[in-house]
Protein backbone atom coordinates (compact mmCIF):
# COMPACT_ATOMS: atom_id res chain seq x y z
CA UNK A 1 0.00 0.00 0.00
CA UNK A 2 2.75 2.41 0.94
CA UNK A 3 4.57 1.63 -2.29
CA UNK A 4 1.53 2.57 -4.34
CA UNK A 5 1.12 5.83 -2.34
CA UNK A 6 4.74 6.81 -2.97
CA UNK A 7 4.35 6.14 -6.71
CA UNK A 8 1.28 8.40 -6.80
CA UNK A 9 3.20 11.19 -5.01
CA UNK A 10 6.08 10.87 -7.43
CA UNK A 11 3.68 11.17 -10.39
CA UNK A 12 1.83 14.19 -8.85
CA UNK A 13 4.93 16.25 -8.02
CA UNK A 14 6.27 16.51 -11.60
CA UNK A 15 2.81 17.46 -12.87
CA UNK A 16 2.46 20.28 -10.31
CA UNK A 17 5.99 21.46 -10.98
CA UNK A 18 5.30 21.55 -14.72
CA UNK A 19 2.13 23.55 -14.20
CA UNK A 20 3.98 26.01 -11.94
CA UNK A 21 6.77 26.36 -14.49
CA UNK A 22 4.25 26.98 -17.29
CA UNK A 23 2.45 29.58 -15.18
CA UNK A 24 5.76 31.31 -14.34
CA UNK A 25 6.69 31.39 -18.03
CA UNK A 26 3.32 32.82 -19.06
CA UNK A 27 3.61 35.46 -16.34
CA UNK A 28 7.11 36.33 -17.50
CA UNK A 29 6.01 36.53 -21.14
CA UNK A 30 3.10 38.82 -20.16
CA UNK A 31 5.43 41.20 -18.31
CA UNK A 32 8.02 41.30 -21.09
CA UNK A 33 5.26 41.83 -23.68
CA UNK A 34 3.81 44.75 -21.69
CA UNK A 35 7.27 46.29 -21.35
CA UNK A 36 7.87 45.98 -25.08
CA UNK A 37 4.38 47.32 -25.83
CA UNK A 38 5.14 50.45 -23.84
CA UNK A 39 8.27 50.89 -25.93
CA UNK A 40 6.43 50.06 -29.18
CA UNK A 41 8.59 46.99 -29.69
CA UNK A 42 5.45 44.86 -29.73
CA UNK A 43 1.84 45.33 -30.82
CA UNK A 44 -0.30 47.85 -28.86
CA UNK A 45 -2.96 46.85 -26.35
CA UNK A 46 -6.44 48.12 -27.18
CA UNK A 47 -7.48 50.99 -24.94
CA UNK A 48 -4.05 51.38 -23.28
CA UNK A 49 -2.40 54.77 -23.54
CA UNK A 50 1.28 54.23 -24.38
CA UNK A 51 2.48 57.40 -22.63
CA UNK A 52 0.73 56.41 -19.40
CA UNK A 53 2.07 52.84 -19.61
CA UNK A 54 5.57 54.08 -20.40
CA UNK A 55 5.64 56.17 -17.22
CA UNK A 56 4.82 53.09 -15.08
CA UNK A 57 7.34 50.71 -16.63
CA UNK A 58 10.29 49.33 -14.60
CA UNK A 59 13.70 50.82 -15.41
CA UNK A 60 15.99 48.05 -14.15
CA UNK A 61 15.97 44.26 -14.06
CA UNK A 62 15.42 44.28 -10.30
CA UNK A 63 12.44 46.60 -10.70
CA UNK A 64 11.14 44.30 -13.44
CA UNK A 65 11.35 41.27 -11.15
CA UNK A 66 9.40 43.08 -8.41
CA UNK A 67 6.92 44.61 -10.87
CA UNK A 68 3.29 43.40 -10.58
CA UNK A 69 -0.02 44.60 -11.96
CA UNK A 70 -1.18 46.13 -8.66
CA UNK A 71 1.52 48.79 -9.10
CA UNK A 72 -0.32 50.11 -12.16
CA UNK A 73 -2.99 52.83 -11.88
CA UNK A 74 -6.61 51.60 -11.90
CA UNK A 75 -7.27 52.81 -15.45
CA UNK A 76 -4.50 50.50 -16.72
CA UNK A 77 -5.17 47.57 -14.41
CA UNK A 78 -8.68 47.19 -15.86
CA UNK A 79 -7.38 47.14 -19.43
CA UNK A 80 -4.47 44.72 -19.14
CA UNK A 81 -3.96 41.13 -18.03
CA UNK A 82 -2.85 40.69 -14.44
CA UNK A 83 0.71 39.68 -13.66
CA UNK A 84 2.83 39.12 -10.59
CA UNK A 85 6.42 39.42 -9.43
CA UNK A 86 8.96 36.86 -10.58
CA UNK A 87 12.36 35.60 -9.41
CA UNK A 88 15.67 36.19 -11.15
CA UNK A 89 16.01 32.40 -11.32
CA UNK A 90 12.86 32.15 -13.43
CA UNK A 91 14.19 34.86 -15.70
CA UNK A 92 17.58 33.17 -16.07
CA UNK A 93 15.89 29.88 -17.03
CA UNK A 94 14.15 31.55 -20.01
CA UNK A 95 16.93 32.86 -22.22
CA UNK A 96 14.63 34.18 -24.95
CA UNK A 97 12.57 36.30 -22.54
CA UNK A 98 15.74 37.47 -20.80
CA UNK A 99 17.19 38.62 -24.12
CA UNK A 100 13.97 40.49 -25.00
CA UNK A 101 13.96 42.10 -21.54
CA UNK A 102 17.57 43.27 -21.81
CA UNK A 103 16.84 44.80 -25.22
CA UNK A 104 13.75 46.59 -23.89
CA UNK A 105 15.55 47.94 -20.82
CA UNK A 106 18.29 49.40 -23.05
CA UNK A 107 15.69 51.23 -25.12
CA UNK A 108 13.90 52.39 -21.98
CA UNK A 109 17.14 53.69 -20.49
CA UNK A 110 17.77 55.75 -23.62
CA UNK A 111 14.25 57.20 -23.42
CA UNK A 112 14.24 57.80 -19.66
CA UNK A 113 15.30 61.47 -19.89
CA UNK A 114 12.91 62.23 -22.73
CA UNK A 115 9.94 60.57 -21.06
CA UNK A 116 10.33 62.20 -17.65
CA UNK A 117 6.96 63.74 -16.67
CA UNK A 118 6.69 67.40 -17.53
CA UNK A 119 5.96 68.31 -13.90
CA UNK A 120 9.15 66.58 -12.74
CA UNK A 121 11.13 68.27 -15.51
CA UNK A 122 9.73 71.64 -14.41
CA UNK A 123 10.63 70.97 -10.75
CA UNK A 124 14.13 69.80 -11.69
CA UNK A 125 14.59 72.83 -13.95
CA UNK A 126 13.39 75.18 -11.21
CA UNK A 127 15.79 73.62 -8.69
CA UNK A 128 18.66 73.94 -11.16
CA UNK A 129 17.77 77.58 -11.84
CA UNK A 130 17.60 78.25 -8.09
CA UNK A 131 21.06 76.70 -7.59
CA UNK A 132 22.46 78.76 -10.46
CA UNK A 133 20.84 81.91 -9.05
CA UNK A 134 22.46 81.25 -5.65
CA UNK A 135 25.86 80.77 -7.31
CA UNK A 136 25.48 83.99 -9.32
CA UNK A 137 24.36 85.82 -6.17
CA UNK A 138 27.46 84.67 -4.25
CA UNK A 139 29.68 85.71 -7.18
CA UNK A 140 27.99 89.12 -7.35
CA UNK A 141 28.43 89.64 -3.59
CA UNK A 142 32.14 88.73 -3.80
CA UNK A 143 32.63 91.11 -6.73
CA UNK A 144 30.74 93.88 -4.91
CA UNK A 145 32.88 93.39 -1.79
CA UNK A 146 36.02 93.48 -3.92
CA UNK A 147 34.87 96.69 -5.64
CA UNK A 148 34.04 98.21 -2.26
CA UNK A 149 37.53 97.38 -0.96
CA UNK A 150 39.09 98.89 -4.08
CA UNK A 151 36.95 102.02 -3.68
CA UNK A 152 38.00 102.40 -0.04
CA UNK A 153 41.66 101.91 -0.99
CA UNK A 154 41.46 104.45 -3.82
CA UNK A 155 39.68 106.95 -1.58
CA UNK A 156 42.45 106.57 0.98
CA UNK A 157 45.10 107.10 -1.69
CA UNK A 158 43.28 110.19 -2.99
CA UNK A 159 43.07 111.66 0.50
CA UNK A 160 46.78 110.98 1.02
CA UNK A 161 47.61 112.60 -2.33
CA UNK A 162 45.47 115.62 -1.51
CA UNK A 163 47.17 115.98 1.87
CA UNK A 164 50.58 115.64 0.22
CA UNK A 165 49.60 118.22 -2.40
CA UNK A 166 48.51 120.68 0.28
CA UNK A 167 51.79 120.13 2.15
CA UNK A 168 53.88 120.61 -1.00
CA UNK A 169 51.89 123.71 -1.94
CA UNK A 170 52.50 125.22 1.48
CA UNK A 171 56.18 124.29 1.35
CA UNK A 172 56.49 125.81 -2.15
CA UNK A 173 54.73 128.99 -1.09
CA UNK A 174 56.97 129.25 1.96
CA UNK A 175 60.11 128.66 -0.12
CA UNK A 176 58.99 131.23 -2.71
CA UNK A 177 58.23 133.72 0.03
CA UNK A 178 61.70 133.20 1.48
CA UNK A 179 63.34 133.66 -1.90
CA UNK A 180 61.34 136.80 -2.65
CA UNK A 181 62.10 138.25 0.76
CA UNK A 182 65.77 137.57 0.21
CA UNK A 183 65.54 139.08 -3.26
CA UNK A 184 63.78 142.13 -1.88
CA UNK A 185 66.46 142.70 0.73
CA UNK A 186 69.24 142.32 -1.84
CA UNK A 187 67.60 144.75 -4.21
CA UNK A 188 67.00 147.25 -1.40
CA UNK A 189 70.66 147.12 -0.39
CA UNK A 190 71.79 147.53 -3.98
CA UNK A 191 69.23 150.25 -4.76
CA UNK A 192 67.72 148.20 -7.59
CA UNK A 193 64.10 148.83 -8.56
CA UNK A 194 61.77 146.01 -7.69
CA UNK A 195 60.48 144.12 -10.72
CA UNK A 196 57.70 141.57 -10.63
CA UNK A 197 58.41 138.34 -12.48
CA UNK A 198 54.87 137.09 -12.00
CA UNK A 199 51.55 138.24 -10.61
CA UNK A 200 51.89 135.88 -7.69
CA UNK A 201 55.39 137.10 -6.97
CA UNK A 202 54.10 140.64 -7.24
CA UNK A 203 51.48 140.00 -4.62
CA UNK A 204 54.01 138.37 -2.34
CA UNK A 205 56.52 141.20 -2.79
CA UNK A 206 53.92 143.86 -2.11
CA UNK A 207 52.84 141.98 0.97
CA UNK A 208 56.43 141.67 2.15
CA UNK A 209 57.06 145.36 1.43
CA UNK A 210 54.06 146.37 3.49
CA UNK A 211 55.20 144.17 6.35
CA UNK A 212 58.72 145.65 6.16
CA UNK A 213 57.38 149.20 6.34
CA UNK A 214 55.12 148.39 9.25
Image (cartoon, helix red, strand yellow):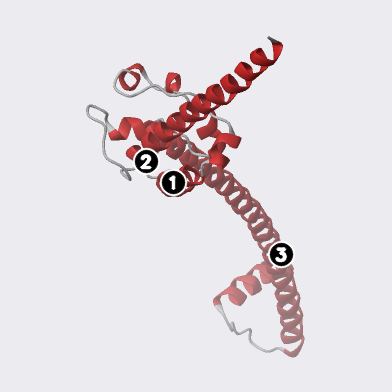
Question: In front: mark 1 or mark 3?
Answer: 1
Q: Please indicate whether residue 86 sits to the left or right of residue 9 in the image.
A: left
Image point (29%, 34%), residue name: 50
Q: Quadrant of the N terminus?
A: top right
Q: Position of residue 59 (x, y in %)?
A: 49, 38
Marking on residue 36: 2
Q: Position of residue 162 (x, y in %)?
A: 66, 61
Q: Are marks 2 and 1 in contact (CB under 8 Å)?
A: yes
Marking on residue 100: 1
Q: First in sequence: mark 1 or mark 3?
A: 1
Number of marks present in the image shown: 3
Which of 14 and 19 lies nearest the eye of the viewer? 14
Q: Is residue 68 above or below residue 96?
A: above
| Residue that badge 3 annotates | 164
- Between the residue at mark 2 and the residue at mark 1, the CA separation in whole angstroms equals 8 Å
Question: In front: mark 2 or mark 3?
Answer: 2
Amino acid sequence: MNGKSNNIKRRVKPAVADRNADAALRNLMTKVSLLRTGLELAGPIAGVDRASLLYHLPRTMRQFNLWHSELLPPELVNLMPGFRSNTQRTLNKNAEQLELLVEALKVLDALSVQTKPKKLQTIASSKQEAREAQILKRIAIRELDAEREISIMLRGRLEALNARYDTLQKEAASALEGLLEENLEMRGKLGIDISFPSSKAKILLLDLTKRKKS
